[in-house]
Each structure stands twice: as C-alpha cells, then as structure tokens.
Image: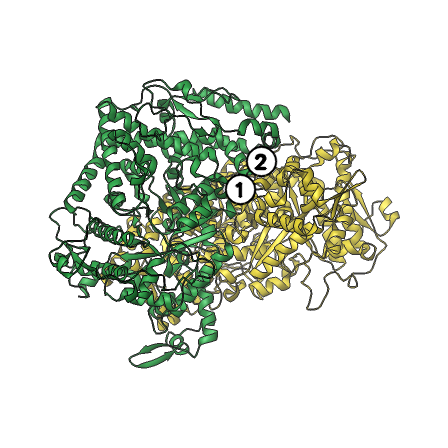
Chain colours: A yellow, B green
Amino acid sequence: AQASAESCELTLDQVLVGNTYVFLPETDEHMLAFAEKVFASETKGEGVRDEISMFEVQDDCPILQQEMAHHLHTDEDTDKRWKWIPTMVSPFALPLNPLFVCPSSSSSSSPSVVRRDMPDFQRVAIIGDYASGVTMDDFELSCKGMYRALAIREKYMRLAFQRFPLTSSQYLREIEGEPFKPEHTVKPVFTSPPKKGEDPFNTKCLPENLSWVARMKDGVIYTYKDAAAADQHKPIENMPAPDYITFIDDMNFLIALIAQGPTKTYTHRRLKFLMSKFNVHEMLNEMEEMKELKLNPHRDFYNCRKVDTHIHAAACMNQKHLLRFIKKSYQIDADRVVQNIKGKDVTMKELFANLNLHPYDLTVDSLDVHAGRQTFQRFDKFNAKYNPVGASELRDLYMKTENYIDGEYFARIIKEVASDLEDARYQYAEPRLSIYGCNPNEWTKLSGWFNKHRVFSPQLKWMIQVPRIYDIFRGRNFVPHFGKMLENIFLPVFQATIEPHANPELSIFLKHVTGFDSVDDESKHSGHMFCTKSPKPEEWNIVKNPSYTYYIYYMYANITMINQLRKARGMNTFQFRPHCGEAGAVTHLLASFMTADNISHGLNLKKSPVLQYLYFLAQIPIAMSPLSNNSLFLEYAKSPLLEFLKKGLIVSLSTDDPMQFHYTREPLMEEYAIAAQVFKLSTCDMCEISRNSVLQSGLSDEEKTHFLGSDYLKEGPEGNDIRKTNVAQIRMAYRYETLCYELNLIKEGLKTE
Amino acid sequence: AQASAESCELTLDQVLVGNTYVFLPETDEHMLAFAEKVFASETKGEGVRDEISMFEVQDDCPILQQEMAHHLHTDEDTDKRWKWIPTMVSPFALPLNPLFVCPSSSSSSSPSVVRRDMPDFQRVAIIGDYASGVTMDDFELSCKGMYRALAIREKYMRLAFQRFPLTSSQYLREIEGEPFKPEHTVKPVFTSPPKKGEDPFNTKCLPENLSWVARMKDGVIYTYKDAAAADQHKPIENMPAPDYITFIDDMNFLIALIAQGPTKTYTHRRLKFLMSKFNVHEMLNEMEEMKELKLNPHRDFYNCRKVDTHIHAAACMNQKHLLRFIKKSYQIDADRVVQNIKGKDVTMKELFANLNLHPYDLTVDSLDVHAGRQTFQRFDKFNAKYNPVGASELRDLYMKTENYIDGEYFARIIKEVASDLEDARYQYAEPRLSIYGCNPNEWTKLSGWFNKHRVFSPQLKWMIQVPRIYDIFRGRNFVPHFGKMLENIFLPVFQATIEPHANPELSIFLKHVTGFDSVDDESKHSGHMFCTKSPKPEEWNIVKNPSYTYYIYYMYANITMINQLRKARGMNTFQFRPHCGEAGAVTHLLASFMTADNISHGLNLKKSPVLQYLYFLAQIPIAMSPLSNNSLFLEYAKSPLLEFLKKGLIVSLSTDDPMQFHYTREPLMEEYAIAAQVFKLSTCDMCEISRNSVLQSGLSDEEKTHFLGSDYLKEGPEGNDIRKTNVAQIRMAYRYETLCYELNLIKEGLKTE
C-alpha cells in the first residue's frame, strides 16, 4: 500500500514536470515557480474542470486517503505545518517583479513589499516580465483604463454610502501618491436586530420631525431647509448629488474602455490567468484547506450562516407550501368574505366555486406555478399570467399585500417561511416587495400591511424592488411622465425621513428595509441611449420606456440623496442592488458597476472580459441563481458560477423564486446542494460562497460581527474567523494575495508613465 | 398579443416543415407520417436535448401560455378531445407494414392488428419498409437473435418466480405459434404489511416444521424428503434447478449475440429510432400529457408514491443526521459501557477520549463520511476506511448490527430514517443489510438484531446484500472454499424455510426480506471466465475471486431453489436484484439479463446496444443513482438516465448512500429534484419514474394495488390508474405501443423464415 501511495504522488510530480512546471516537493520554505505564459496557454477556457479531473481521481485513491488520514492525525506534524510564519516572498522579490505585495498599511508609498502574518501554503508565483503577454504600450494603456474605472466606481460608491474594498482603495491611493485615510471610507448603515424584549414596531425611538422640505428637480430629489430654499434650489449643504454631466462622461469613458481592443485582450488574459492560477492552487492546496476545516471545531457547512441574497417575496414559498396554505385556508375560512365585487361580498367558497375549483382537488400540477412550462414574474407584462390555476383572483387573495383581507394570507405565508428559516437557524433571506411608482400612496399601503400584520422576523431583511414598467403606466395614463414615477417611488421615503412621526408606519418599515432592487426582463430593448441630450425625467412624457441605464442612474441618484439625508439623521441607509446582466446588453453591467453596491445574476459578465475583470478588481458581490437561470436563460451546466468563483469574483447563491424553481422544503439548501453536485464544489468553496452571501447581504454590523467574526470588515485572512465561517485561511490568503497581485500590476503599469 | 401567439405557432410548423416533416396541425383524426430514415439521421445522439430546446423556449412564451390556459379551461373542448376512442390505426395498416399492433389477447395468431381503447393523441407512424435500414438477411438474423435472447430470459425468470412482461411473452408465443396461457405466468410473492393491530414479529402464523433436508451439491442447495434421499441426490420433485450446461450454452449464445456485427448495427439503429420517436412524441404531446395531469384531481408529483429502490442501510441516514445522532447519544449515554476491549469495559466517554475527540466539536467535516474526497463502501477492500472520523470504533458503535450494545444505535438510526419517511408519507425505501457468508451464524445474529430492536416499518422493505469478497475471506482462511461461503449465505434460509419454528427470529426476518443484492466494485477483474470447465464451488479453494458471472450464477441458482421451496410452502419469495453495470465488463449486464429480476446502476448499457435493446424489450427495471455515479464513476450531465428514460427503458431513481452523497433532509427528493433540474424532466417524466420505482420494488401486491391501482399488473394504459400514479394515459399508450411495435418487428423478422 505504501509503495502504491508513493507512486500516486510521483505521478503528480511527473505530470507537472512533464508540463515544464518545476517545483520542489516537501520544501515548505520555497515557493514554487511557474511561468505565467506556460500555464496561461495550457488552459483551454471551459474545459479546465475536465483537465484537472486526473487529480480528482487521485483524491479518491483510498490509499492516498490513508496517507492523508495519517497526515491529519499526526499532531507534531500539525504543529509544525500550522504555525503562522511570515510569508517568504523575499527570495523572489526582484526589483522589477510584481510579485505578491500587500498594500502598505502605513501612509508611505515606498517599497510596497511588506511582510504580514499569513498562513503557510504552496503559492503560485510568477517570475519574469509583468506585461502579461501584451506589448508594453498596451499594458500601460490597459492599466490606465483600469485605474480610472476603479476610481470612478470608488467615487460613486462613496457618494452613496456604498462599499468599495479597502485594498483596492489603498492601491488607488498608492497610484495617486496620496496617503490612504481609513476615515475616508464609508459604509452602509443597517438597523440592528431588536434587543431582547424590544419591539421592532416601536415608534418611540424614531428621530424627531424636522421642517425640511424635499422636492424633485430634474428627476432627483433634494432636501432643502425650507420651501424658500427649495424655490431657489439651494439644497442643504454636504448632501451632494451626483453630477449628471460628469456621470455621462464617466459612463462614456467606460463604454469606450470595454470596447478597447488592447484592454479586452489584456483583461481576457488576466482572467484566464486567474482561472489557471486557481486550478493550480486547488491542486496544490485543497487537502490543506480541507485539513483546516476538519480541525475547525463545531463548524461545518450546515451551521455556517448563509443568506438567500435574492428572493422575491411573492414567490418565496415553494409550490407545495402555497398549495398546502390554500387548502388549509379553505378548511378554516370557507365562509369568510374575501372579495367584494361591485358591492357584492364574495366568500372564499363562492370564489372557488366561481372558478369551478375545489381546493381539495387542487394539486401542484393544476396550481401551475412552477417553471419549465410557465411564464415568470420577472416579465412584468405577463405578470397577470403568474397566477395560481391561471386565476388572478387567487394571486390577489394569497400573494398580494393589498386586497379585501388586507394581505393577511400573504403575511401569514411569509411568516411561515420565516418560521421555517428560524427553525433551520443558519439561513437568512432578503425578500423583495414591490413599489411600482404608479401612485404616491403605495408606500403607505405597503408599510400599513407590514405594521398591521407585524411581518417581522430576524431571519428576513427587506428589499424594495421597482419594476421598470413606466411604459405600461404611461400607456394607461397612470403617470404623466417618468419624473412623477420617480417621485412616487422616492418622495415618500424623503418625507418619512424628515418627519418620521408624521409617517410612523412607513418610518418603522424603512428601518427594516436595507436596499432597492430594479427588476424586469432585461432582454427588452428600449432603443434609447442615455446621454446628455436625454430628456430629463419630468420631460420624459412619451409612452416609450427609458433605457436600463436611465432607470439605473435615476434610482442611484435618488438613493444617494436619501442615504445622505438618512445618514445625517442617524438613520439606516439603503443599498442599490439591481438585477443586472441576466440578459440584454453588457452596458447594463457597466451602469451597475458605476452605481450598484452589488447585483443579482451577472451572467453577461461572460460576454465582457473588461467588465468581468473590473467586477473582480472592485470585488462586487453577485447573487447568482443558477436554478432560476436554468429555467429562464441559461442551462445549469453552462452557468458561469464555477468560473466566477474560481477567478475570485464574489459570488453568492440565491433562489430567486422558490415557488417557480425549487422542489424541496429547503430551497436555499437545494440551491447549494445542486451547485455542489454539478460543480463538484469542495466544502471550502461552499463555505466561501456562504460567507460571501453574508457580506453581500443587508444584515447589520452587529449580525455580521456575530456570524463572521469581529474583524469581518478587514480584508484578507485577518478578516476571517474560521471558527465562524469555516473558510480556510489558506483560501482567504490566496484570494487576498491574488487580488493584491492584480492591483499591483495596475500600479506597475502606471509607474512607467 | 394574439398576433404574436399565432406567429409562435407558425414558427413551430415551419421548423418541422423545414426538416421535411409534414403534418396537418389541428387534425386529430389523422396520424402523422414520419419517415424513419429521415429522423434517425436527424438525431445526433447526445445532442438531442439541445436540438429541441428551440421548442422549449417557445413553451416559455407567455402568450402561448395564455393560449394553453384557454385551451385547458374550455370544457366542451375537453370533452371532445378526451373521450376514449378506438385508435385509428387502420388508415395506415398496409399489409406488409409493421405498424402499431397489440398482441392478440385471444389465442388465435391470426391478423394481429387489434383495436383497443386507447387515448387519442398524435402518434408517430412509420410507412414503408420495416427492415430499419439494414439488409433483409441482417434483419432476420437480428430478429432471430433477439427472439432467442428473450426466450432465454423468460425461461430463467419463470424458474425463479421472477417477472417477465406479459406483452413480451404474448409476442414470443405468437412467434412460436403457441397459445399464450396467462396461467403460465409467474410472479414473486411479497409479504403484505401487517393488518391493523397485527404484530409483524408474531411467530404464531409461521407454517409448521417439516422434516425435509436441505443440502448443497455442486454449489446449489437442494431440498430432499429426508437424509437418505439427500445421500442419493433425489431432490423433491417440481423444484427444478437451473441446468448448468444449458445455462452456459445460453450464456455463450448471448455473448456471441452481443458481439455480432449485424445485430449490433440493427439494435443501435432501433435505439436511435426509439430516441427520435420519443423526441417527436414529446414535441407533439407534452402539452396534452400535462393537460391530463392538470385535470387529475388531488394527485401530483409530491403525493404519488416513490420508492428508493437502492439504498444501503449502513449509509441510509445523511451525514448531518449521523452527526446529530452521535452528539445526542453522547449527551445521554456518555457513561454507558459501549465496548469491551480485552476484558475491560469502555464507556462512551472513554471511547471518545481515546480517539482524542469530543462530540461537541465534531462537524460533518471532521466526521468525513461524505463523498468527493472519500472512499466508498462499495470498494469493500477499503471498507475499513469508511468510518466516521476515520475511526472504525465509531463505525462499529453506530453503524453495525453486531457490537457490544447489540446494534442498538444502528437500529435507532434506521428507525429515525423510517420515521422521517413515515412523516413524508409517500416515500418508501429498500435498505440493504449485509450477509457475508463468512460464518453460518450471520443470519442468526442479523435476525436477532432485527427482532430484538423491532426494526420494522411499513416504509421499509429489506434486502440482503452479499459482497463479492470471497478472496478476502479465503485469504484469511475464514472459509475453505467458495462452496462454503455459498452454504453460509443460503443454507440457513433453507433451514428456516423448512423448520420455521426452529428458527423463529430468522423466519420472521425473512418474511420482511424481499430480495438479494450482489455488491462490490465491479471494476475489479477476476480474470476468470465462467465456463463448463470452471471448478465447482466446492472445488474453488484458491484465493482468487471467482468472476462476476460465476457469483451471479450461483446466487441465482440458490435463490431459484429457495423460491421454489418457499412458494411450495406458501411463503414469500426473493428477487435477485444485483448491482450491475456500474463499472467493469458488459458481460455483467449479460449475466443479470439472464438471472436478475432487476438491477441497480446499469450505466454500462451505454456500451452495448444489443444489451440495451434487450433490457428495453424485456422491460428490466434499472435503479439508477446519478448522484452516486457523479461522485464515483460518471459525471452527472453524462448520466444515461435521460437517454434511457426517453428510449423506454424502465428506470427508477435511488439514492445509494445518502450519507455519502446527499446534502438535504430528504435525500430521495434531492435525487429527483436534481434530475428534474439538470435533465429538465416534465412532471409526467417524474411521475413515470416514481411509478417505475413502485413496480420495481419489493412492495407487496396489496401495497402496489393501493399505490398504483387495482389493474397494476396489466400492461399499457389499462394497467395505469392516473388518479393514483399521475402518469398521463398518453404516455402509457405511447410506451405500450412503442414496445409492441418493436416486438412486432421481431415477429415479422421471423415470419419470413
């Protein structure tokens, strides 16, 4: 057996040697040298997983397992290998070499190779030229573009109290020769969960009313001291709006950048490199990562926290749950009046009789809300078809906040879902509720529902989704122009923020709202190009829908203004987390790059290497829903989830619509289980995704500290508490060093100027 | 919207026309004509699913949906379309044409085109030559081979009280010009569940003891009136053993057949045809199938019965369940003595302390029983490594029937699994327990455990698995020869059958056992070829393991003898259901074709078109476990499950080892959900798989009647009760007609002789 185990290891070495990689096995003090060009050309894009399967087979080799078991249970060995020693970067730190370098934590921009306490693992190092196989000119051009793109995002994130990675900021400051000032960083504010015995609906803690005035100008709502200031458009200071002209400038720069040949080539090569590098990392370190997790007491994939970062409230129950609820409600409430049609009361019995249905006979087949043969709520035009048994009456009764029974059933279903999550203990969800902007009192009604039924659960963090269906409202003459729609959506939030006690229910509700989502079918094209000549929202009175970017800009601008106001008032802020890149043009992903804290879907990052690389550099979280995509836009096996994860993009898993896509009682676990099976994810991969989901979510600072550790805001391994996250420190270090390496390349590219 | 819906439908027509298919839309009275050659060449094997995805996109077309909804809710329309009318086969019934024909239910072998009551749907009919693109000689040769192969299987099934489809038998009789006698058909006997208040462990109902003698001769156990008859080898009459020489003859014929060029070509073409035909059927009828299901009250995929047809008892709990159980047991029983090492009592606390473990710290990572990085119980040589935390002590304590605490924990875990199934209500499982054949008292111990802990649940049907590890036992000198191993496995069963009251616990246990499984790593080659010169089991005293086929033959022969004896005594019989075709040579599948009622895995049917077609013609059930395969032998997306299902092979879904492969609390649902998502199965597909699983299982006649309908033994749509199975009658008719068509082809091929 011993001989056989040895031959296994030999094979591993030989394969690598055969590919001209040379490393010294068992020599922990030396890092391994790999030639970037060799393995960049080795990797053939999609087929990567197959190529390394040879090694996976060897993992299964039972004799090797025994070796591993021995390895894992030898305590002296453990001690030796697991002490934290300073990273040995110096042997390779040749002057011109952009090796692993951390941003200097001091303000000095002098030699940036800094020793840090990092776990010891087999690192992938690159020796030689740093232009990544493109000409020096192209390299410099690309780095310049990347730098400016990151600086643009940093600016808009800061303005809106959204997040930008510290590490990236530090590199930007180094490039600019400016000192990095941690106090310049901003972060969103979320409401902490109620203390024990505290009532989440208590209005006493609301700040006092002010006499300020909020008013829209050119599609953006400003806050003024009083009406006079408003008339003269003299908004309160220190609440700057994004500058429209600059924004368009920045946008045009980015549009040019993502189409620029050299930058496309460069970023494409960098992404391929990131992929290959992870594959090598995985081969070399997966056993070591697993070992960390095995030695980590009391924490495994099941009890590390995970957040369903993208789920629509109206479809948050699975089909079986909805069916059961309908049957149960009929048993209890058959004689209850649930509708009033033209002044005539209709009982539930009558309602079902009118539909020629008896709930006893109802099945998930006849309920017909599951995907595969169905249309989807996302396509809002066809929303009317997204109805149990094809009957909008049932949708109204069970899945609406506004109906004859004041949304009581919908509230109860959501509370049942929350109660299941509470039972599961480690799962959280961020359901979206709709504000359409059709009518200014939508907020009143929605928050009335929320307060009346006390739809609160510590497991739920609320989001507001705004469908992009101005064209429909305008067509039916519900709104005179786009500006009115924006006003209906945002003005009530400003008013409740200024006068909380005049709007107590809304103010309470807003405390529990963590962000805004923008939803609709992205594959619909508006034909409009957002530019300086675009009509202002108040002038947009045609029936045609504005473009995705136009919507995104005005949502961002108004959220920015709200956040500044709320921050000033000591209230929680909102994140902008649109659906983006599920379909349609890549420019959607560009708009979100400028404006969104994080996005849902992001599939189309596949189509733009420049944007994909930028999403990596800016570490923008992406809530992916491969099961939803599987039924709508992209077959499961073609999902870029695994590719994104390997390259180091920040992906999380979410369900989107359990009612339509899932089969089991635990939709989020189903989502993770299928990803794990299809993509053969390791426990470390799954726990990394879970950790990403908590970071991406609107959970409060207090909760994140509890779930991820007290240093969760720090980046790299020092921000990770393995006892809480079950993510290996080796993985964290790999991610951090990889990010630093790529950011440092940009710095190097700009140095030569 | 209306216009748009029309354009959708137009596209559908145009595409078909563009591919030279012509059909008259909306003309229900006429079947559609397709040229076999055209669509056989259209279909490119694996890519089929992709090719039809165009239509799937159109399913999602919401406007089409509205059309459908309208369609479904028009009652007159429903009435018109849903009356059962005689199938309109006559228009195409040209004399030489092997169109759809059912076997004649009368004994006359005259014109076999018979009208039956069948649902009306769009059928795929073939006009013209029936030689399927091979020469007439090759066609006749292939049909002859197919006929003989089926006749061989029928013979061995009948001998062992195993199943053979009535339809196939009817065709065989027609070919032979013999009358079909339903009374000739045999079927297995399973124990009905206990009546209300009846004790499943009650020994009073056992038949009385006889003075018969069971004794092994040439590896097969015979029953004799007394010892004198045994000495002269004069077994009791009417209990014929399979004839060894004939069996080898039959086997050699089949080996030649599966290698025969013309037959390979012919069956390959037939299988491609079956695939294409199903694809066309699906395109034409999936909406109609769905409509049947929607109109079917109170039954959907969730509440149709499904059986986990292949699961190992030792891994029937998921990893999280095992972890929880270990922690719980420690909380309660820390001071309980659970081991005795060299006369010294060891408490659970001490046991864990010796392992340097505290259950509180234990996680699924450190438990380390999940696949992906693990070895597997199937590879029995490495069985020792399949231990929680790598500690065989924990395996002994928690997952064994024989230990210091008499297998109490294992019994409790299994009862918890059963209780979860009882809560889920519609799910059943057939766990395997091991008999090794190392020692004659294994049965006593196992049945003692079963009775002592009353490990009975209506949700569980027990199977005995026999690992093929003679070589290990012989190597350690546990058995002198292979014959002794067989005797250890089977003789106690004969003895308990002859003298139930002398072996009450075993007799009770055997009542609840429904079959035997043969397990081990099939990829291990023994090098031995089973032939007339093979040593008899009593002479097989070398350390080398016999071949798979040798094992299978002797297991089959002994099960046959047991079944005849038990049938004569009015007791339940056993099915032979080996693991087969998971890996290794295709001859494994040949051996099972001759001997097994049904098999587990069957992946290698991919490699032999002849066997695959025979498994189709004989409708041999295959319990597939794509998640298990995904971790062991075959990537999920490459699983032949979908292909087999489409072609009409009888597939069911099973978990194999939830402990190693599954993540959620409902492993069987997880298995179905993943298959549904990855393969985009329709509800009808999933319910058909569920129905297959019930038919394949060892559930009793009473239970099958309850779960599938009183006519479940009939074949075709009349055997289906949609109210219980939720399988569309259109699907049933399609399957039945397709089988009849293929069988009829063989009949036609033999007629010309």
Looking at the picture, tell me which residue is in the foreground, A723 or A589: A723
Q: Amino acid at mark 2?
A: Gly
Looking at the picture, tell me which residue is in the foreground, B641 or B541: B541
Q: Amino acid at mark 1?
A: Asn
Q: Earlier in the sequence, mark 2 or mark 1?
A: 2
Q: How many marks?
A: 2
Q: Residue furthest bottom?
A: B344
* Quadrant including the N terminus of chain A: bottom left
Which marked residue is nearer to the observer: mark 2 or mark 1? 1
Q: Is B593 situated above or below B430?
A: above
Relative placement, left or right, of A447 versus A312 is: right
The image position of residue A103, as x and y in percent, is 53, 58
Cβ atoms under marks 2 and 1 closer than 8 Å: no
Q: Residues within 10 Å of mark 1 (few under 14, many from 20)?
A: many
What SS does tag 2 mark?
loop
Please give the chain letter of the residue carrying mark 2: A
Picture residue at 20% right of the left edge, 39% below the top: B255
Q: Is residue A63 visible?
A: no
Q: Is residue B584 visible?
A: yes
**Residue A584, numbered label:** 2
What SS does tag 1 mark?
helix
Spatial CA span between label 2 and label 1: 14 Å
Please give the chain letter of the residue carrying mark 1: A
Relative placement, left or right, of B77 versus B727 is: right
Q: Residues within 10 Å of mark 2 (few under 14, many from 20)?
A: some
Looking at the picture, tell me which residue is in the foreground, B429 or A34: B429
Relative placement, left or right, of A539 versus B659 is: right
The image position of residue B244, as x and y in percent, is 16, 47
The image position of residue A442, as x and y in percent, is 76, 45
Relative placement, left or right, of B414 versus B165 is: right
The image position of residue B563, as x and y in percent, is 27, 52
- Which residue position holds label 1? A629
